Image: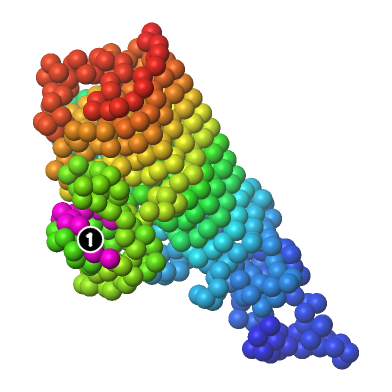
Amino acid sequence: MKTLHWKKMAAVLAVGLCAHNPIEVARAALPQPPILNVSTDLDRLPGDYKASNMIPNSAQDSAPLLNDAIRWVSHYNRENPDTPYTTIKAKRGVYYFLSTTKVGGRDVFVVVQPENGNDRFKYVTIDLDGSDLFFSQAEDEAFMISGCRNLTLESFSIDYATLPFTQLVVLGIVNSNQITVTPESVAPSQTPWVDVYQLSQTQARAALYGFDFRNGRPQYTSGRLTIQLQTGPSSTLTLQQGDTSLIQVGDVFEVEARGGGPAVSVDTSSNISLKNIAIYSSGGVGIITNYSPGVSIQNVSIVPRPGTNRLVSTNAGGIAVNQTAANNTIVNCTIAGTQDDSISGNSSALGYSRDAVPAGATAVTLAQPMSSLVMPGINVYFVDPSTVMPIRESNSDELVIRTVVSVVPSGTGLVVTMKRGLPELPAFAMMYNVEPGTRGKGLLIDSNSISYNTLARGIALSGQTGVTISHNRIVSTEEAGILCATDYGTDPHLDGGYWTFGPVSNLRIDRNVLIAADSGTGPGLGLSELAAIQLVVTNLQDEPVSSPVCPDVIITNNRIVNTPRTGIWIMNAQRGLVEGNTLTNTGYDPTLQAPSHIPSSYNITGNQAMIDFETPLLIQSSKVIVGKNPVN
């Protein structure tokens, strides 16, 4: 152990020490591994740590105390690898987290990472014994996990003392873009609503959106409405986008300040387990992972807080496994009332060529590079932005595969040099690592319950390979229940940027139940609202690809009940099987309301749209085996 810490402990423990062996006495006075109990042991830590225990059911700020416990365990385990702490635990109770720590420009309540940047916080379980954790502001992250390995977080709930949304009862319709409202009543024990003026002021990084509810259920016909920021308290809401024609007096109108969060983030870590956790609110997504292999999310609930009249949980999605690494699992989770995709994920390209590359050149300048993933020694291949097909050697069926020998930053991109010359590459060609583990191989989404999101899909994935989506129950989604996308077009969120999600492959969708999926029938119907289960392929021009590009797509034994348009719509599958799916009451409301966002190149407007949307199973530009799929 470092001399500095022993000197501080000696000063703290000087009174009453036995003369026989001061160092051994000092060691004995410390909380002993393998368990550090934050409710009883923190006051025995050395002097540069907080000399106070986390007291349950008090108004104390627990944030610095839990952060100190994590710092101490990280330090101690590095110094004592043979006798480490394996568990951080707490007495069950209610804990409040009031202060944040700045981490790379982000405000975080609990920072779970090594004290020493050259080490890893590893082989530790943080078990809070079913405690309820309340964080002061929903625009800040509750837990940030970074640079950790073989870590478990379990048995606690996350909620926010200042909610990032409010629920209002509609009193009157003033005109096409204004309604009058009053706050919905709450029980005395329930966290009170904040008004729209407070949301406008306190959620500085957020946008205000509104959703209409009737009899406790979202009204998908009215869509998501954009709310004008208020400059003072008012009982009148003004819409910036959308209109009031589908809102009724007596409806509950929910307004969210979407921005910030997530509640839990996992970044560049491995073998992380999140289990038996409940998330009741968040300014953004509930859980986000970023390029972290071996993440297990199990028995997690992202739902409106039980015992309240809340209609929503998170202000954005539920669980997002972004830049999906290998062997992630989402199993036995319950997700309800999210305000975006309940489960989502993507595996984007390593970057795309900024310009066309002439034949024989060895260097490619990557735009939007995944810098941490582009390194010498990796083997890469390229995807054409117009055909969305892997680029092949001239006059050959072999893929263009090259070995990276050097990577040099250049402005906002990277200059990547290959071991040998390239064939001609078009501008915007996507570059991928050959290793499938970098594109989410082994992702399993199984036995989850998803229901009543206000916006977007139940499960939405882009660009992965080796994925299984099985045994999930999906009830009432605004867009597709299950959407797997290959999307390469102008990115609406980044000026001059592009989506770079290439072909999905080795996809299995099996034994899921979808009830009232794709129920949004309002204006602005988009590409992800064509069917209950949907495979979508577009190119750089945002046009449908005309040939099969997604290999090994298996869609079997799913049950689809009550969807207003197509039951299953498969585009551009190359090799696969569609069999044993049961489709009941599909295509019952095929009407498209203007303005439609479906590109005209899809040729599914007017009469053709009616035909397509009334077709229970639609296979387009694909080469798959289609077996028996009963239609009721």
Give left or right: position of 357 versus 233: left
Q: Position of residue 391 (x, y in %)?
A: 24, 49
User: Which is nearer the eye, 285 or 39?
Assistant: 285
Tell me if residue 554 is in the magenta stretch. no
Amino acid type at circle 1 is Leu
Count up the numbered dots. 1
Instruction: Give the quadrant of the C terminus.
Output: top left
Instruction: Report whether 516 appears left or right of 621.
Output: right
Q: Residue furthest top?
A: 632
Q: Can residue 498 be seen at all in this image of the molecule?
A: no
The residue at the point 60 percent across, 44 percent down is 276
Q: Which residue is mark 1?
A: 422
Give residue 421's quadrant in the image: bottom left
Q: 502 or 74: which is nearer to us?
A: 502
- Which element is circle 1 on? loop
Q: Position of residue 595 (x, y in %)?
A: 12, 30
